[in-house]
Amino acid sequence: MNATAEDRDETTIPLSVIVPMHNEADVLDEFFERTLSVLDKLDMPSEIVCVNDGSHDDTLARLTARAMRDSRIVVVDLSRNFGKEVAMTAGLDHASGEITVFIDADLQDPPELIPEFLARWREGYENVYGARTSRRSDTMMKRLTAKGFYQLFNRMADVQVPIDAGDFRLLGIQATAALRQLRERRRFMKALFSWLGYPSVGVPYVRPQRAAGKSSFNFWRLWNFAIEGFTSHSSALLRMWTYLGLLAAGVCMLFGLYFVVEYFVSDSNPQGFYITILMVIFFGSLQMITLGIIGEYVGRIYDEVKDRPLYLTNSVVRFDEPKAKPKRRKKSAPDAG
């Protein structure tokens, strides 16, 4: 039994299922049918916190209609699209549960695993994540690039992220409370989950195809997501250029020695025009790349110094009872703690 819950009646510990949503109208009916069916079988209070992250379809209208029929559904409507990582944080801020489950609405993360997640939590694990045993639903290119990214990330970063894990997971009482304290603006949630450091375990599952709709992640967004991960949890990219600079200096010394020897041996000026051009281009490129990497880190410092809120909300809809008049409130910023 988990140490933080062993002296409490588990039926009194609330569970919040946090779902970031962006243009998910086509899959909502099936998602709620399956998820609510799972929650109905749990002997504990529960809710579903749905975060509308700037959807352009009728996701918000459908969420509100659902909330009118079921008081367990909470709708957080963000003022614009802030991205999945921030949407997950908004859901966490508005969740009343002490235990949280993060899940996508596209049903590639099966809600039927939630009871198994809870079983592992009772064994003492604070971070229970879904471990994908198969990614056949992804393209070959996506599988290769994802595997390469996480292998490189784990070599460079100060935390280790499971290669076959996504955001689908359960956080126990301690881990949920700890995650609420992390307020950096540029967020890479997979690494933040690992940074918490509590006992973790994976629950294997086969990742199916999307139930409906189309993923909003394209190659460019995935590339930026990878850069975010590296720069948020590692300074290795900066340190790397120290060694490259030393290597380049060594290469220059060898070329200089070669030109000196050639001058005295051949008694003529060395024919080094093309080599000179290549060296200028090479070192100019290194400088541009170095400045770009430094700029990424400086940009993150700039974002933190501005101290803007992580997100803004249009409304937060929480029905105390089914079909009751909704309570709406505007929230300009989350409590930074």
Image: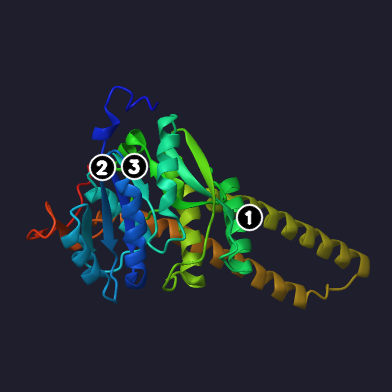
Task: Specify whether residue 109 is in view.
Answer: yes
As helix, strand or loop, the secondary structure at mark 2 comes to: loop
| Spot occupied by residue 316 in the image (x, y as percentages of width and height) | 16, 58
x, y (%) of residue 33?
33, 60
- Give the answer, above or below, for where 198 lies relative to 314: above
Q: Quadrant of residue 45?
A: top left
Camera-nearest residue between 2 and 182: 2
Separation (CA) of disc 2 from disc 1: 51 Å
Residue 245: which numbered mark, if any? 1
Residue at image coords 24%, 69%: 62
Q: In the displayed structure, would residue 191 be above or below residue 249? A: above
Q: Considering only vertical position in the picture, is 33 above or below 10?
A: below
Cα–Cα span, label 1 and label 3: 38 Å
Q: Which mark is residue 102?
A: none
* Label 2 packing within 10 angstroms: few (<14), some (14-19), many (20+): many
Q: Which residue is mark 3?
A: 179
Q: Earlier in the sequence, mark 3 or mark 2?
A: 2
Horizontal arrangement in the rendering, residue 232 relative to residue 12 (left or right): right
Residue 280 placement, left or right of 182: right
N-terminal of the pair, mark 2 or mark 1, is 2
Where is residue 40? Give x, y as percent: 30, 48
Way the structure is coloured: rainbow
The C terminus, quarter of image: top left
Badge 1: few (under 14), some or many (20 or more) residues near its Cα, within 10 Å?
some
Identify which amino acid the numbered label 1 is placed on: Gly
Q: Residue at x 60, y 64 (%)?
A: 286
Question: Where, by quadrant of the figure, is residue 307 drawn?
Answer: bottom left
Q: Circles 1 and 3: CB distance less than 8 Å?
A: no
| Mark 2, residue position | 97
Q: CB under 8 Å between callouts 2 and 1?
A: no
**Label 2 sits on what residue type?**
Gly
Q: Amino acid at mark 3?
A: Leu
